[in-house]
Amino acid sequence: MKKNFLFIIIFTIAGQIVFGQSKEEWKSKVDPVVINKIQSGPTEFMIVMKEQADLSQSNMLDTKEEKGNYVYKTLVETAKHSQASVISLLDELKLDYKQYWIANAYLVKGDLNAISQLANLPAVAQIIENASYTVPKPIVESFDEGNNNRAVEWGLTQINADKVWALGYKGQGAVVGGEDTGYDWTHPAIKKKYRGWNGTTADHNYNWHDAITTGNGGICGLNSKVPCDDQQHGTHTMGTMIGDDGAGNQIGVAPMAKWIGARNMGQGAGTLATYVDCFQ
């Protein structure tokens, strides 16, 4: 009788320990920043799935088109077959969410109860903060007015871009993709290089994307259908990449390349989700 009683006690204590561990195990998957934020009410967070696409086979393909198709299909298929349990729970909890196949992740807004249930799913690797990012303000420095109109900008000569041009390589045939505060596509230094401009009309389909759909979109508004820059940082960086003012002042590294763009920051501020959205 004493042996049986002792066994019951040991079994009960062991069960409580195991149950206690499993009950809190979900927290090991959750960014402490998210848990702190959630104390004040529902918050946005990113769910990262455990299964990630294996893209190594793309190295065996010959052309850029073949590689691109393989990568796209593999990413989409991986997301599709690995996300079923998460989608089911998100729908059951009636939460708003956005899927990202490019990273096999989700943007979700929910409370602590939702986070604990989602983190308990075996398919979920981690839950992280939808961190915010702000573009640094420019540093204003004095400059020599006499050298304001250089034929080739100082930065380009420092990286020997002009020597590469002399070999015949100026970015011809390449398309540069940028994501930033947006782009003033009509700026004379980059307009002619925009892939959506044929010299007469503009086509922004598959040439521009705006990930700023909430909050204050500044002068561009929200989900702008045309390239727009409400902070000018993006226009500046695109000029550095492909810009040419047409008046002999070379400002871009690849002046014969084309460009496409996306806006991941509204008024200079973006989030992890807006960055991922633009990559996708």
Image: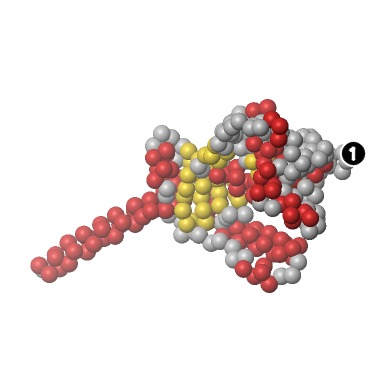
Q: Position of residue 13 (x, y in %)?
A: 21, 59
Query: Could you say which is closer to the camera, residue 118 or residue 276?
Result: 276
Q: Is residue 273 left or right of residue 7?
A: right
The residue at which mark 1 appears reads as 200
Q: Residue at x 57, y 33 (%)?
A: 139
In this rendering, the answer to whether 119 lies above or below 234 is: below
Q: Position of residue 261 (x, y in %)?
A: 71, 44
Are there few (<14), some (14-19), or many (20+) residues within 10 Å of tag 1? Answer: few
Specify the quadrant of the image occupied by residue 59: bottom right
Specify the quadrant of the image occupied by residue 61: bottom right
Q: Is residue 239 left or right of residue 28?
A: right
Q: Is residue 170 left or right of residue 57?
A: right
Q: Residue at x 74, y 39 (%)?
A: 150
Q: Is residue 47 visible?
A: yes
| Residue farthest along the right direction in this orientation | 200
Q: Residue at x 67, y 67 (%)?
A: 58
Query: Could you say which is closer to the camera, residue 119 or residue 159?
Result: 159
Quadrant of the snapshot with the N terminus: bottom left
User: Which amino acid does the dot numbered 1 rest on?
Assistant: Thr
The color scheme shown is secondary structure
Q: Position of residue 268 (x, y in %)?
A: 59, 34
Query: Could you say which is closer to the camera, residue 229 or residue 221?
Result: 229
Q: Position of residue 70 (x, y in %)?
A: 70, 64
Q: Residue at x 76, y 62 (%)?
A: 65
| Residue farthest along the left direction in this orientation | 2
